[in-house]
Image (tube, rainbow, N blue to C red):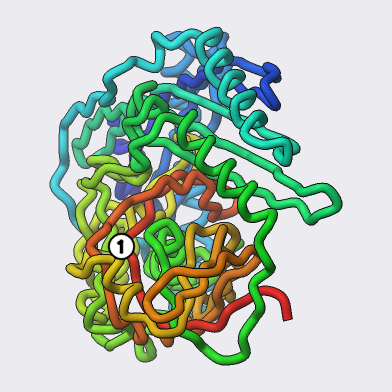
Amino acid sequence: MIQHAGSLKNCKYADIRLGIHETKHANAEDGKAKGLGEDASISFGIRVLAGEMSAWGYYGQSLGKGESNPKSIRKILTLGINKAYARAVANASKKAEFKSLAPSLTAVNLAGIVSCNDTINAVFDEDPRNVSLKEMLTFCTKISGDVRGVSKDVQYACVNVQTGINRELFCSTEGSCIDQSYALTQGMVSVVAQKPGGIPEVCYDYAGDLRGWEVLKGNNVYKQSLGDFAALRTRETVELTEAEFLPATTEPVVVVTNPHFNALLVHEIVGHPTEADRALKLETAYAGRSWLFRDFQDNELGKQIASPLLTAYSDPSIQGYGHYKYDMEGTPGKRVNLIENGILRGFMNGREYAAILGHPPNGSMRAIEPHYVPIVRMTNTVFANGDKNPAEIISEVEDGYYIVNHRIPSISESRENFRISAQKVFKIESGKITKLFRGGGITADSKDFLMNVDAVGNDFEVFPIPNCGKGQPMQVMRVGNGGPTLRSRARLTGHQ
């Protein structure tokens, strides 16, 4: 099939992704079974780079049960290649037509990579395909019932679980042929607690990894079974119903942020702004542009944007939701040093964006399924580990606040400032954690916050972020984010 694409006139490049996704799920509320099911889907995506002033053409679709036999797949893929090619030629023709009005229009170039032939098998101890729906439903029904029974103040408890295997074949006209599979298992806990006549407190959180059913038995970042994880989050939620609401401040105060909170912080103010398509303003839908790159003459590359204590990187080779060996262009994924000792060093990219920036390709193109267009997505994007004990970081604070676990972000269009709410906030007085608050978080200018980091902990962790949205049509991707404890300065958000 890929040879057919390469034979078309002025076809510079083409690739095909064909994938099978198998998944099972179950959910329960308040100790009662609510639903279960299993699904399998096949889809493909084809990209063709063609035309005199070369441009992309894309075609993708899902396949029904009647189309999933080899003969039908071959016919549909041939039609798909022809449609993608026709779109590429039409796009190239329009670019040439408007070249005089828009001199910035140029042919698409791809940074070179070494063609790969490889097979990557899914990693698991307990095969998701061997877990029965009955076992899954019984599992989450029991946990939701146990959670509801933690306290009379628990008004609602919901548990969702899923497990499955995804397999994707990638072939290109450059000779790559890569067969990658990965398992995915995830549990979500949602809890509502309320004192009589009080204001409800809501918590939802996830435990998951790219492994088998063992993830929900304790093989995860929390080192807890889903039952223990759910019970802990429930007790914390009940405790918060008795806490006062955090008062807001008009001036920055000392804040110590824990690794779970920093997962969302690095995601929003470092991860998204260092995605090259965002920086180049070639993908600005939904979540905006980048405070790090205004244009080629005005950007932060090579400049100090954070404390010398702070390093941030994106690395698909480490364990987490952003783990893989090859991206969806067949490029080997590798660690990208985004910030080194406070200096901005680079961006996550794809081959086209690497060529524009003059950087080596680093394998950061991803899509939720083959029929979606690959775009630049963060992988396991984190603040690097430090060397200071978190307890020592807190003990050095005379007057400040301990910000624990992320909840909801509100981010400016280019990520130059942020407001992120926390699950809990504690007062720090004379180096001791004292009073608990609810309903608050922190806000700051992104650069100010990063520049004011004066302590980095040695408690590095990577957490699952299952709902990162980007693109049109929207792609909700799973990524890994995290880091260690940090100390900086920010204003408190909460009640005036």
> Toward the viewer: 210 or 5?
210
> Toward the viewer: 200 or 172?
200
Q: Is residue 368 left or right of residue 35?
A: left
* Residue 432 visible in the picture: yes
> Toward the viewer: 58 or 440?
440
Q: Circle 1 is placed at which residue position?
A: 484
Direction right: furthest residue: 197
Q: Secondary structure at mark 1?
A: loop
Q: Position of residue 262 (x, y in %)?
A: 41, 63
Q: Residue 39 is drawn in which quadrant?
A: top right
Tell me which residue sits at (28%, 87%) in the image.
304
Q: Quadrant of the N terminus?
A: top left
Q: Quadrant of the C terminus?
A: bottom right
How many other residues sit within 10 Å of disc 1, few (<14), some (14-19) or many (≥20)? many
Q: Position of residue 248 (x, y in %)?
A: 65, 80
Q: Position of residue 6 (x, y in %)?
A: 30, 38
In the rendered structure, which amino acid carries the disc numbered 1?
A: Pro
**Numbered-mark total:** 1
> Toward the viewer: 429 or 294?
429
Tell me which residue sits at (24%, 24%) in the image.
121
Q: Residue 124 is drawn in which quadrant?
A: top left
- Residue 195 against residue 137 in the figure, above or below: below
Q: Residue 101 is drawn in which quadrant?
A: bottom right
* Residue 59 visible in the picture: no
- Residue 135 against residue 282 in the figure, above or below: above
- Residue 6 against residue 50 in the figure, above or below: above
Q: Position of residue 289 (x, y in %)?
A: 51, 73
Tell me which residue sits at (58%, 19%) in the image.
142
Tell me which residue sits at (42%, 56%) in the image.
260
